[in-house]
Amino acid sequence: HLYDGTLALAEENNGVNRGGVISTSGATSQVTLHGGVIENGVTTDRGGNIYVGGGTLDICGATIQNGTANSGNVNGGGNIFALGSSTVTMSAGKVIGGYTTKTGGNICVGTSTLIVTGGEISGGKAEKAADNLYVYYNVGSNAQISGGYIESLHYADSVNPVEISGNPKIGLLDIAAGKTIVLGELTEGADIT
């Protein structure tokens, strides 16, 4: 649990393979970010700031910013990369300013579940695709968006549809050919471009 303070990449750790600041693995791992700042992580693969390789990541108020994934893999996740049947939830806070040489400037989700009910995902840059949020992988990826602000969402290569309901604000919704979005009841304040 992080409530306050700053976690950042120490210079001598530069070049970490996955999760420049935080890396988890295993179904029982749990990280909860109530506040504070996680920043400036740099990896040579995925998850510039945070790599979630199983278990859960709950973002309920922290700022995760300026991560860099110089990925040699297909996908990057400049700030956060989730894989391995992970669950990432975001109810408040910010994931901003991430960069990757591949996909998912801020967040890249594969074979995992992403639930966004609030907060902000913006200001990311991906050289290949999806500056802010990328949901991919043929089996097991699931995204449920019901609140918050997402500057752009790119949805590709997943069997499961992205579910959108409630009052999210999505600046750009980019859906690959043949993919499905399940649009539930939208409430006042919802804005999807």
Image (cartoon, helix red, strand yellow):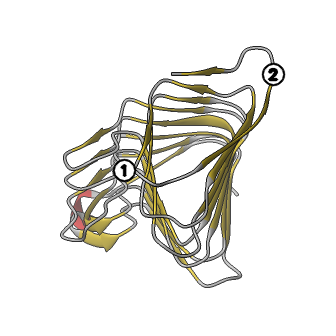
73 to the left or right of 104: left
182 to the left or right of 41: right
Kindly identify which residue carries mark 2. Answer: 187
Q: Are marks 1 and 2 in contact (CB under 8 Å)?
A: no
Inspect the image, locate mark 2, and give the three-letter code of the amino acid beneath it.
Answer: Thr
Query: 164 above or below 120?
Result: below
- Residue at figure coordinates x 48%, y 72% from the top left: 138
Residue 93 visible in image: yes
Of tags 1 and 2, the one toward the viewer is: 2
In this rendered view, identify the residue nearer to me: 27 or 169: 169
- Residue at figure coordinates x 70%, y 58% from the top left: 1
* Residue 4, percent from left and from top: 64, 42
Q: Identify the mark at residue 168; answer none if there is no mark.
A: none
Kindly identify which residue carries mark 1. Answer: 104
Q: Quadrant of residue 172?
A: top left
- Residue at figure coordinates x 69%, y 20% from the top left: 190
Q: Determine the secondary structure under disc 2.
A: loop
Inspect the image, locate mark 1, and give the three-letter code of the amino acid beneath it.
Answer: Gly
Residue density around tag 2, few if under 14, some if 14–19, many if 20 or more, within 10 Å: few
* Residue 75, percent from left and from top: 31, 63
Q: Quadrant of residue 152?
A: top left
Q: Quadrant of residue 125?
A: top left
117 to the left or right of 110: right
Question: What distance separates the C-alpha of mark 1 from that of mark 2?
Answer: 28 Å
Residue 2 visible in image: no
Query: 124 above or below 39?
Result: above
Query: 19 above or below 26?
Result: above
> Mark 1 or mark 2, which has the lower sequence index?
1
